[in-house]
């Protein structure tokens, strides 16, 4: 369903933010489980938990964005698994790299690990939208109706 009062581009950005918000929640919950419930609380362990939580939320977000943001109707498994998902990982890799480098730097400032992860999510979101829209789903057919 499309709201007639907003442009398709703005609608896509808003849906991206909602999808990204759900991926951020997945990321934060997984980090909380790893650090606070499983006790992986040393600085090194927190970094490992951060990386694992990022990867799981990354795959989750790919499928959310593909289905609900870019609204791609075709589900050719080979195309999705051999082209789009790898391109998505490459595109998101830049944001993941920035987040990975940012985490220990912000950690040195004494910022709580969940706030640190949230900051990385915000920085990565802007990079992700531009790269995904221009490289991963650029030529994909989508309907915003």
Image (cartoon, helix red, strand yellow):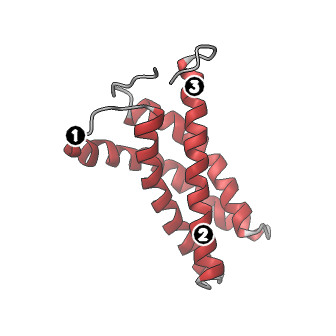
**Callout 1: 10 Å neighbours few (<14), some, many (20+)?**
few
Which residue is most to the right? Answer: 110
The residue located at (26%, 49%) in the rendering is 81
Seen at 58% across and 14% down, the residue is 4
Q: In this view, does 65 lie to the left or right of 119?
A: left
Label 1–label 3 contact, CB within 8 A:
no
Q: Disc 1 on helix, strand or loop? A: loop
Instruction: Give the Cα separation between the discs numbered 1 and 2.
Output: 32 Å
* Mark before the other along the chain sequence, 2 or 3: 3
Q: Where is residue 39 in the image (x, y as percent from the top left)?
A: 62, 85
Disc 2: CA contacts within 10 A as few (<14), some (14-19) or many (>=20): many
Q: Name the residue under label 1.
A: 76
Element at label 2: helix
Percent of width and height locating residue 47:
58, 72
Answer with left or right where residue 55 lies relative to residue 104.
left
Are the residues flagged by discs 1 and 2 in contact, CB closer than 8 Å? no
**Callouts 2 and 3 close, C-beta under 8 Å:** no
Outermost residue, front direction? 1
- Find residue 11 and name its label: 3
From the image, tell me which residue sits under label 2: 31
Q: Is residue 79 above or below residue 97?
A: above
Image point (58%, 30%), residue name: 13
**40 or 15, which is in the foreground?**
15
Marks 2/3: CA–CA distance? 30 Å
Q: Which of 121 and 67 is in front in this view?
A: 67
Residue 124 visible in the snapshot: no
Corner quadrant of residue 101 = bottom right
Q: Which disc is residue 89 wearing?
A: none
Q: Which residue is drawn at 20% across and 45% down?
A: 78
**105 horizontally vs 7: left or right:** right
For marks 1 and 2, the one nearer the N-term is 2
């Amino acid at each position: 369903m499309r709201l007639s009062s907003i442009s398709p581009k703005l609608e896509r950005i808003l849906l991206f933010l909602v999808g990204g918000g759900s991926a951020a929640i997945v990321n934060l919950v997984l980090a909380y489980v790893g650090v606070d419930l499983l006790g992986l609380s040393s600085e090194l362990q927190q970094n490992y938990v951060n990386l694992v939580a990022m990867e799981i939320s990354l795959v989750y977000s790919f499928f959310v964005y593909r289905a609900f943001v870019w609204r791609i109707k075709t589900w050719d498994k080979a195309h999705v698994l051999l082209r789009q998902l790898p391109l998505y990982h490459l595109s998101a890799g830049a944001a993941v790299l920035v987040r990975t480098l940012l985490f220990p730097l912000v950690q040195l400032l004494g910022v709580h690990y969940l706030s640190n992860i949230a900051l990385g999510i915000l920085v990565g979101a802007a990079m992700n939208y531009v790269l995904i829209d221009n490289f991963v789903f650029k030529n994909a057919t989508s309907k915003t109706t």
